[in-house]
Image: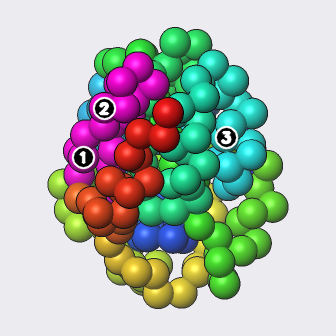
Amino acid sequence: MAVAGVAVFPADTVYGLACRPDSREAVGRLYGLKGRAPEQAAAVMFFSLELALAALPELGPRTRGALERLLPGGVTLLLGNPGARYPLACGTDPATLGLRVPALAGALAPLGAVRWPVLQSSANHHGEAAQRRLADVPAAIRAEADLLLDGGELPGTASTVVDLRGYEQDGRWRLMRAGAVGEAVLAEALQPRW
């Protein structure tokens, strides 16, 4: 994929759009395809937990433990970002980073070979439903994307969004968007272990 390229790809939840997280041109194209305002945050996706943890060395031990219990899987985690990493994904809040590591089983397993992060968002127009089949991704998005990856039919429920910005200090977490991972699973994984 070119430096400014945008891909439509299958995740463990719904189809997504992906581009280089450090290319202003690529991020601008991705946001343009979605019709999304550039001040809105996106997430950075790694295709392995080990790569994510290595890229975010400032994470404290409690937060790292939470990531190890929740990822890979259908969650997007909002983390403190003291290193101001991946600023193009942070919208107007550089102190917060969205992190996603999908579970890559079956037809998605080849994505595990991707060794770099991507800025990602669901492959739909802003405010519309996320799609579970490549053919249902809006035709205009498919036509403008540089790469289309078909992973077959996906579960179709977007990732659960969880705010972990206070977790390191006192175990606080907050469900921001219900999704693929239920609240009971989150509560079990995030109960204090210290």
* 48 or 188: nearer the viewer: 188
Q: Amino acid at mark 2?
A: Arg
Q: Is residue 7 above or below residue 156?
A: above
Query: How far, Cα to Cα, is label 1 from label 2?
Result: 10 Å
User: Are discs 1 and 2 less than 8 Å apart at CB?
Assistant: no
Residue at x 24% of width, y 46% of height: 175
* 62 or 21: nearer the viewer: 62
Number of numbered markers: 3
Q: Mark 2 falls on what kind of element?
A: loop
Indicate whether residue 173 is drawn in magenta: yes
Q: Range of the magenta residues?
A: 158-177
Q: Mark 1 falls on what kind of element?
A: strand
- The reply to whether residue 63 is in sight is yes
Please provide percent x and percent y for residue 106: 66, 84
**On the image, numbered disc 1 is attached to which residue?**
175
Q: Is residue 83 left or right of residue 27?
A: right
Q: Amino acid at mark 3?
A: Ala
Q: Is residue 59 above or below residue 67?
A: above
Q: Residue furthest left?
A: 127
User: Are discs 3 and 1 less than 8 Å apart at CB?
Assistant: no
Residue at x 51% of width, y 54% of height: 70
What number is the disc on residue 52? 3
**On the image, numbered disc 2 is attached to which residue?**
172
Q: Residues within 10 Å of mark 2 (few under 14, many from 20)?
A: some
